[in-house]
Image (spheres, helix red, strand yellow):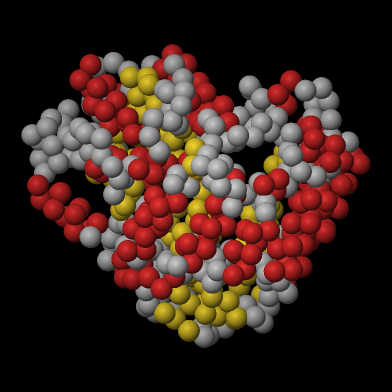
């Protein structure tokens, strides 16, 4: 087992499941472990510490976690001193049951005390017994913690955590608590820090991002925040996105801010869940289909080029064929650029799990297939409208799974659409290219002609140099584990 005086620091790996919030929390976890002297393990290596950042929302989340823990048990047996930690929403839900079911787990921590992880790992090693620590309310806002960012060109910025809604299908409020908002100055300071590192695109995150300001009594705070991000354009902030707004809280001042702030992208991900007012009421979604469509009309009136995406649940308890037809109607009217579609499945602890009218699997599956067919028809028609148009693409890593075989590169247009384009020498992830759309598919665009322009960026320079984007946080006396001086110096150089 590595001691404080050992030359080699302990290594770690973070495995993430679930939503963007979890992805961003994992960046915080990695940042904490970096700051405590751990080093990210190479993919082929067995890490000294494996952290599971779990999700309780996705189907079969429990089975997936315990299956992965089971696969790790023999690995741990062969590597004395290896530690396994479980955090995230499933840890908050199952709590001490995780150690009972998988006694080889060393640490269990919740959504409210991410910052405790390094201390808990050290305590588990010292005491040689599992440490389970879960708080019922937020200990410290996660964004005050250091982060090791996954990208040199795009960054997540959490503006709030938790949720004040009571949707009957959702377990998130009980796991992440009531909404807590950061002060605007703190949010902007983090955005500025990312821009200073060369990041070009920032996505503002919140469970209901547009209710931002509820805690400090300013219902217009989110629109003001978008405009404030616009003031950072001259410093290099080229794109601002946000996810996910709640239709019930969507106000015209946000639409105005989107339309009038040059670096705010004309893309909107706004969950629908159902097009049936009866089902929306049963879901406790405090808007109706007409209200949803009126928001889309207002967005398109202000920004005709806006790409609108959504989430839809099929087969909610009590959903009739007429209800489902109403959902199909909204899909046709809304003309979504894409839609994330889900078959309803029970989540223990939610009111919907015990509702009458649970639908047979075959009924849900058949409706799901019809919905998918319509979504593809609509999104393909919308994408075809862009053939022949010029698009600005932020070159990305890992967006195109077939890029190696096709010789293309991939990235996102300003409206969020995925674009595969003809590769050329010298283009790096983080660079900006302009190209012309030559072909449209339901889920992506191709641009197979010559590039119209290619702009080198600081983000591309950083990616090419293998740098890691880090943002500092407020350290709370977290223990280190003997990081060598030379390593510390090299890490400081990367962060500068």
At a point 57% along the width and 83% down the height, the residue shown is: 449
In the depicted structure, whether residue 399 falls above or below residue 141: below
At a point 27% along the width and 66% down the height, the residue shown is: 465
In front of the other: 439 or 453:
453
At a point 32% along the width and 62% down the height, the residue shown is: 197
Estimate the x, y position of residue 231 in percent, counting from the top left: 45, 67
Which quadrant of the structure image shows residue 308? bottom right
Q: Is residue 73 left or right of residue 95?
A: left
Q: Residue furthest right?
A: 322
In the depicted structure, whether residue 449 falls above or below residue 458: below
Estimate the x, y position of residue 395 in percent, counting from the top left: 46, 69
Q: Is residue 410 left or right of residue 36?
A: right
In front of the other: 429 or 299:
299
At a point 48% along the width and 77% down the height, the residue shown is: 433
Which quadrant of the structure image shows residue 73? top left
Question: Total label count?
Answer: 0
Estimate the x, y position of residue 354 in percent, counting from the top left: 74, 20
């Amino acid at each position: 087992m590595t001691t404080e005086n050992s030359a080699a620091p302990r290594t770690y790996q973070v495995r993430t499941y679930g939503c963007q919030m979890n992805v961003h929390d994992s960046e915080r976890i990695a940042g904490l472990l970096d700051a405590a002297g751990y080093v990210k393990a190479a993919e082929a290596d067995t890490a000294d510490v494996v952290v599971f950042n779990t999700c309780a929302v996705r189907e079969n989340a429990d089975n997936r976690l315990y299956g992965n823990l089971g696969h790790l048990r023999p690995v741990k047996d062969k590597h004395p001193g290896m530690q396994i930690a479980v955090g995230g929403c499933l840890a908050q839900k199952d709590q001490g049951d995780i150690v009972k079911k998988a006694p080889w787990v060393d640490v269990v921590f919740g959504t409210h005390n991410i910052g405790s992880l390094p201390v808990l790992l050290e305590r588990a090693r010292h005491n040689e017994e599992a440490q389970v620590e879960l708080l019922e309310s937020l200990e410290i806002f996660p964004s005050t913690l250091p982060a090791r960012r996954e990208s040199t060109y795009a960054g997540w910025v959490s503006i709030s955590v938790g949720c004040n809604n009571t949707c009957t299908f959702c377990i998130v409020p009980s796991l992440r608590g009531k909404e807590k908002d950061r002060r605007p100055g703190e949010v902007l300071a983090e955005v500025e820090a990312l821009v200073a590192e060369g990041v070009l695109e920032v996505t503002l995150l919140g469970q209901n991002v547009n209710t931002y300001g509820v805690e400090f009594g300013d219902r217009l705070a989110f629109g003001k925040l978008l405009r404030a991000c616009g003031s950072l354009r001259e410093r290099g902030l080229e794109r601002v996105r946000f996810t996910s707004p709640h239709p019930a809280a969507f106000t015209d001042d946000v639409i105005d801010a989107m339309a009038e702030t040059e670096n705010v992208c004309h893309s909107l991900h706004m969950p629908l869940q159902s097009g049936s007012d009866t089902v929306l009421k049963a879901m406790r979604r405090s808007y109706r289909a007409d209200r949803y469509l009126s928001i889309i009309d207002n967005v398109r009136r202000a920004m005709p080029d806006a790409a609108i995406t959504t989430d839809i649940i099929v087969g909610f308890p009590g959903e009739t064929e007429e209800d489902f037809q109403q959902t199909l109607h909204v899909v046709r009217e809304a003309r979504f650029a894409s839609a994330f579609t889900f078959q309803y499945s029970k989540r223990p602890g939610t009111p919907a799990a015990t509702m009458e009218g649970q639908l047979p699997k075959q009924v849900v599956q058949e409706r799901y297939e019809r919905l998918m067919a319509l979504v593809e028809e609509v999104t393909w028609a919308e994408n075809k409208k862009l053939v022949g148009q010029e698009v600005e693409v932020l070159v990305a890593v890992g967006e195109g799974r077939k890029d190696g075989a096709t010789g293309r590169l991939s990235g996102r247009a300003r409206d969020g659409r995925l674009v595969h384009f003809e590769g050329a020498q010298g283009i790096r992830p983080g660079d900006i290219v302009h190209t012309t759309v030559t072909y449209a598919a339901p889920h992506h665009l191709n641009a197979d002609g010559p590039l119209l322009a290619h702009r080198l960026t600081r983000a591309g320079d950083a990616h090419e140099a293998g740098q890691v984007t880090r943002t500092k946080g407020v350290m709370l006396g977290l223990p280190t584990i003997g990081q060598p001086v030379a390593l510390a110096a090299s890490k400081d150089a990367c962060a500068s």
